[in-house]
Each structure stands twice: as C-alpha cells, then as structure tokens.
Image: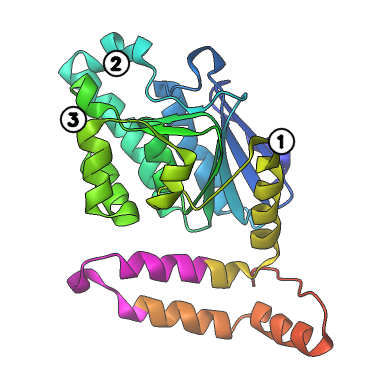
Amino acid sequence: MATQDYVSTTERVLVRLEGSALHIVFNNLARHNALSVDMWGAVPALLKQAEHDERVRLVVFSGAGEKAFVSGADISQFEDQRAAKEAVKVYESLAEEALMGIYRFPKPTLACIRGWCIGGGVNVAISCDIRIAASDAVFSIPAARLGLGYRYSALKNLVDLVGVGPAKDLFFTARRIDAAEAQRIGLVTRTCGVDDLAALLAEYTGSIGENAPLTVMAGKAIMGEILKPSPELDMQRCRDLILGCFESEDYAEGRRAFMEKRRPIFKGQ
C-alpha cells in the first residue's frame, strides 16, 4: 500500500504517512476545525486502511492551523443535520462510528492538541490512547449550554479517564480549562510550550515506531479488557496475546539485540 493510497473522502480531513505514523488532520479552518458530517464520515475508512497497513504503528490526530484541534461540532449544520429526528440519528451514528473506531483501533492513537479542544474535540481526544497538548490548549464540554443529549460512550470514556468527580465538574459546569489543569486531572498526558509541541510529538512517533508493535498492541488490548466489567473480562484472550508476543520473531530479535548491545529492529512478526 503506497502513501498515495490514503485518500480522504473530504478535503476537510487531510491524511499523510510520515515514517510509521499516519497523520489524520482535521481541516475546517473557517470554523476552527469544527467537525462536520463529512469529517466524521471520513475517519472510519482511513482507520480501516491503517489497521491493515504493516507500516503504520501509530495514528496521530491533529487540527490544521494554529488555533484549534477541534472546536466542537460545525453548528452551521445543526438545522440541516440535527433539527429533524432522523437527521439527529444520522449525525449521531456517524459520530459514534468514528469515535468508537478510534477507541477500538488496535494500534496506538495519539491526539496532538493546540488551541481549542471543545465538545467533539474532547471526544476525539479521549477516544485516543495518548493526549499531548501545547500550553495554549483550551478544553470544554459545553453540551449543557446547548441542550444536547450526550452519548453514553463519550461519558464513559471521560469517566474512565479522569474519574467521576472531574467528569461531573466539566460536564455540569461546561467551564473551560487550560492545558495545565487538563494535565492535573488526567485529561491530557503531557503538556509543553507551543514551540515544543512538534518535538514532543516526534518523541512519541519515534519511540512508538521503534518499539515492538505486537507487544504494544497486546498491551493495548489487555488494558481494554481490564476496563471491562469483570463478567466480560476475556482472560483467555489476554493469555493468547501474551503468548503470541513470546512466540514472535520480534521477541527473538529483542533478545538478540539486547545481547549484542544494539537497537532492535522490530517487524511486527
């Protein structure tokens, strides 16, 4: 699969492959990267391609420009897409498919955040495994100011990530918080100055790209099992994933590299 095979269904979602990282960029600059129906719809197909591309070891989500990651839903579409009951169902279905596609994606996902990260932007970010943010990032969940119904999966992701107390605080008040507070409550993993964000992102794409992909994916899958209610926990799947790592060529390469005091070259096999 060549890089040019990654084609977005809309010009408002850009895609590029850099090394082992696939970058999906929300590109609705006129509306600070607010998410429109076509943007939601573009994500699942790109993730499906990336899942089966052995070169891709990480998917990075970011926003075009310097002002926003995602500023929420594109409210210019509210009357057309959300006013009628059937239109609401369509919009919510597209958003749910995209967000759960990110959440369930078997490889690591990372949200690289600058500027506004509001509503749907927070949902995208918390669907990812890792969130890094520049110091100019601003977060808010303004559903209560808009009278919107909020989906179960989004609130569960939020509670699982930051805990029920901070989740209620953010949701009930709809207040805005800065990057420092977002890090304190666990909404983002690491923060840095605006000028340092590219370097911080490169640190992640570099390290994840070099690490053993089968081990990383097994760890992600097992952590997903840990978050399930105990009756739904699939321990046999966890055992199989661990055994698969020990039986892989990558494990043999890791041992050889350690003994030879060199950097391992993992192939995901």
| Residue 122 pos. (x, y %) | 39, 37
Question: Is residue 230 inside the magenta stretch?
Answer: yes
CA gap, disc 3 to disc 2? 15 Å
What is the quadrant of the C terminus in the image? bottom right
What residue is at 20 percent from the left and 27 percent from the top? 144
What residue is at 69 percent from the left and 42 percent from the top? 196
| Residue 219 located left or right of residue 157 | right
Q: Mark 1 points at which residue?
A: 4
What residue is at 33 percent from the left and 53 percent from the top? 162
Quarter of the image for residue 98 reads top left
| Residue 220 pos. (x, y %) | 46, 65
Mark 2 or mark 1, which has the lower sequence index? 1
Badge 3 crowding class, 10 Å Cα cut-off, few under 14, some 14 to 19, many 20 or more, is few
Task: Please determine whether, in this image, residue 233 is positioned above or below residue 54.
Answer: below
Q: Mark 3 points at which residue?
A: 149
- Say what amino acid the circle numbered 2 marks: Gln
Helix, strand or loop at disc 3? Answer: loop
| Residue 197 located left or right of residue 175 | right
Q: Residue 81 carries which label?
A: 2
Region in magenta: 217-236
| Residue 182 pos. (x, y %) | 42, 44
CA gap, disc 2 to disc 1? 32 Å
Task: Please determine whether, in this image, residue 3 is positioned above or below residue 37.
Answer: below
